[in-house]
Image (cartoon, rainbow, N blue to C red):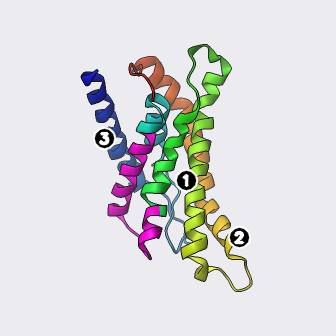
Amino acid sequence: MKKERLVTLVEMALAIALGAVLNYMSVRLPIHIAGGSISLDMLPIIVIALRRGPVAGVVTGALYGFVNLAMGPYIVHPAQVVLDYPLAFGLVGLAGLLPSRPDAGDMAVARAPIGAVVGGLARLASHYVSGVVFFGANAPEGQPVWLYSLVYNATYMLPSIVACAVAAAIVVPVLDRTVPARSARG
């Protein structure tokens, strides 16, 4: 049991480090004046969540959120920091809520991209709330703040979600065949 916990902790640490590397390869569009980029940095969190469960996924995501904060923060308020960094990336770990059943057949193949979409949309929700509460002043005159936040955050989150869903559909089945997760998910 202790060895399995150690293996899980090492996998989590490697996922955080890989997320940081993937973040450096992100694409930032000129319209993203208040942060946000198209990136695969959610992928390692999604992989941990799907292989080790939602608790490990949420913890990995939250810790990665702090690393992401240290790498290039955009801070306007302490509550915004929580919403845009540890909470947003922690919510990516909800990808692990999808049940894992060996007899699931075709559903097992769809589990990775569906998990990526679930985790990515949860992260988008956190950024959306942050945008409504803390970045409404950036909205063009006459545009509702809720719409501005949704469009702004969707311009980088939706491509990131799609990219992570495609990558997860490829990576997770390969990992499951070559490096089986031996611990109970939880």
Q: Position of residue 80 (x, y in %)?
A: 47, 69
Task: Please check the rendered image and state whether residue 106 is part of the magenta-colored stretch, yes or no.
Answer: no
**Total count of labels:** 3
Q: Is residue 157 or residue 102 the one in the foreground?
A: 102
Q: Earlier in the sequence, mark 3 or mark 1?
A: 3
| On screen, residue 61 above or below 28 | above
Give the magenta range: 57-82
Looking at the image, which residue is at 39% across and 47% down? 19
Q: Earlier in the sequence, mark 2 or mark 1?
A: 1
Q: Is residue 21 or residue 146 the one in the foreground?
A: 146
Classify 10 Å Cα crowding around label 2: few (below 14), some (14-19), many (20 and above).
Answer: some
Classify 10 Å Cα crowding around label 1: few (below 14), some (14-19), many (20 and above).
Answer: many
Q: Is residue 94 left or right of residue 73?
A: right
Q: Is residue 118 left or right of residue 11?
A: right
* Type of amino acid under label 2: Leu
Q: Position of residue 62 (x, y in %)?
A: 40, 50
Q: Which residue is mark 1?
A: 123
Please tell me whether the stretch drawn in magenta is mainly helix, strand or loop. Answer: helix
Q: Which residue is mark 2?
A: 147
Q: Earlier in the sequence, mark 2 or mark 3?
A: 3
Does the CB distance between marks 2 and 3 fall below 8 Å? no
Q: Which residue is mark 3?
A: 13
Callout 1: helix, strand or loop? helix
Callout 2: helix, strand or loop? helix
Alpha-carbon span between mark 2 and mark 1: 17 Å
